[in-house]
Amino acid sequence: MQALLGPDETGIVIAGFSPPAVVIARYGLDVRGTGAIEQNLSGGLAFGDRLRVDAGFQREAAYDQSSWRFAVGLAFRAGRYLIAATRGSGINDVGATYRIGLSAGVLR
């Protein structure tokens, strides 16, 4: 096993996969101007640059209330495009949140 350190990610390489799988852990903190604190704690499993699965908890603050919510996501690469989809529970259980992203590697 080998530890990978980056500006916003820490990963551990798992041998036995081709390309090797990398376990990634993340933590983020945001302090708003009102003093509210939002946090993100998540982890994922990446298989090279082709497939990535993430899950985590976010603490959100809105209207003088805060709550933790769960989100899970999947991203895969098709050529120079990275397609990502995420589903999370809404704050205070008011509906779900869906996110879809498309990134293009122009210089790839």
Image (tube, rainbow, N blue to C red):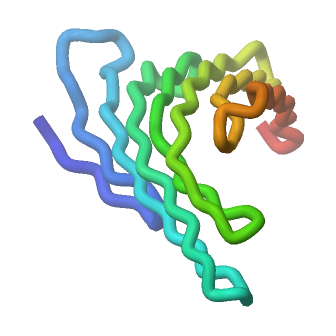
Q: Is residue 11 visible?
A: yes
In the rendered image, the vertical position of residue 76 relative to residue 106, given as above or below: above
Expressed as whole percent of the image width and height from the top left, the position of residue 33 reads: 73, 89
In the rendered image, the vertical position of residue 46 relative to residue 91, given as above or below: above
Expressed as whole percent of the image width and height from the top left, the position of residue 27 reads: 42, 58
Which quarter of the rendered picture does the C terminus lie within? Answer: top right
Judged left or right of residue 48, residue 10 is left
In the rendered image, the vertical position of residue 92 relative to residue 74, given as above or below: below
Q: Is residue 82 visible?
A: no
- Pick the residue in front: 68 or 15: 68
Q: Quarter-wise, where is residue 87 in the image?
A: top right
- Pick the residue in front: 51 or 56: 56
Residue drawn at (39%, 26%), measured in percent from left and top? 45
Residue drawn at (38%, 17%), measured in percent from left and top? 19
Q: Residue furthest left?
A: 1
In the rendered image, the vertical position of residue 7 relative to residue 102, given as above or below: below
Residue drawn at (75%, 33%), measured in percent from left and top? 94
- Pick the residue in front: 44 or 60: 60
Expressed as whole percent of the image width and height from the top left, the position of residue 102 reads: 85, 30
